[in-house]
Image (tube, helix red, strand yellow):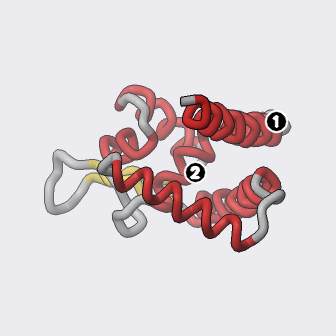
Amino acid sequence: MPEVEGALVRMKQILRWIERADAAEFAKSDDFTLQDYKTLHVLMVQPWPTEATPAQLAEAANVTRAAMTSRLDRLAEAELITRQVDGADRRRVLIRPTQKGRDMWNRYIFEGMARDQQALGALSGEELGKLNDLLRKILLSLGE
């Protein structure tokens, strides 16, 4: 059905536009990368209260545990996160954002939200509501 293909192609194009805009913004910085931001982001918005294990973060970021370890090494070196052995279970390491990490995330989250709003700026508030309702309906039908 051409309408299905058209909708999927357009959704992918919108996401690519946002990804390119994000990449262009982070390309301006040598010391804080898009991957750094994405890692801090999953730590800040994940369901556990301000802490998570590396495995939980890897799953939330959809990266391998090895890739997450590399990302966490970089963030720890920049003093954006801490790693601490869990007192209740010494096999677990808990990752927490530092104040510097929170400040860095706050700096970039609003810039990213502005790019997202630009991407969907052609729609009115009512149209965005309808779009959200339709996308939610699709996700629910997929069990997501």
The x and y percentages for residue 21 are 79, 40
Task: Look at label 1 and name its amino acid.
Answer: Ala
Number of other residues with Cα within 10 Å of mark 1, as a class: few under 14, some 14 to 19, many 20 or more: few
- Using the image, determine if residue 12 lies above or below residue 116: above
- The answer, for residue 119, to whether it is visible in the render is yes
- Horizontal and vertical percent for residue 112? 73, 54
Q: Which residue is mark 2?
A: 79
Q: Which residue is found at the position 37% from the left and 63% from the top?
A: 47
Camera-nearest residue between 102 and 88: 102
In front here: 102 or 128? 128
Answer left or right for 88 relative to 140: left
Secondary structure type for disc 2: loop
x, y percent for residue 107: 73, 61
Q: Residues within 10 Å of mark 2 (few under 14, many from 20)?
A: some
The quadrant holding residue 51 is: bottom left
Looking at the rendering, which quadrant does residue 15 occupy?
top right
Residue 73 location in percent, x, y? 49, 36
The amino acid on which the numbered mark 2 sits, given as a three-letter code, is: Glu
Residue position for label 1: 24
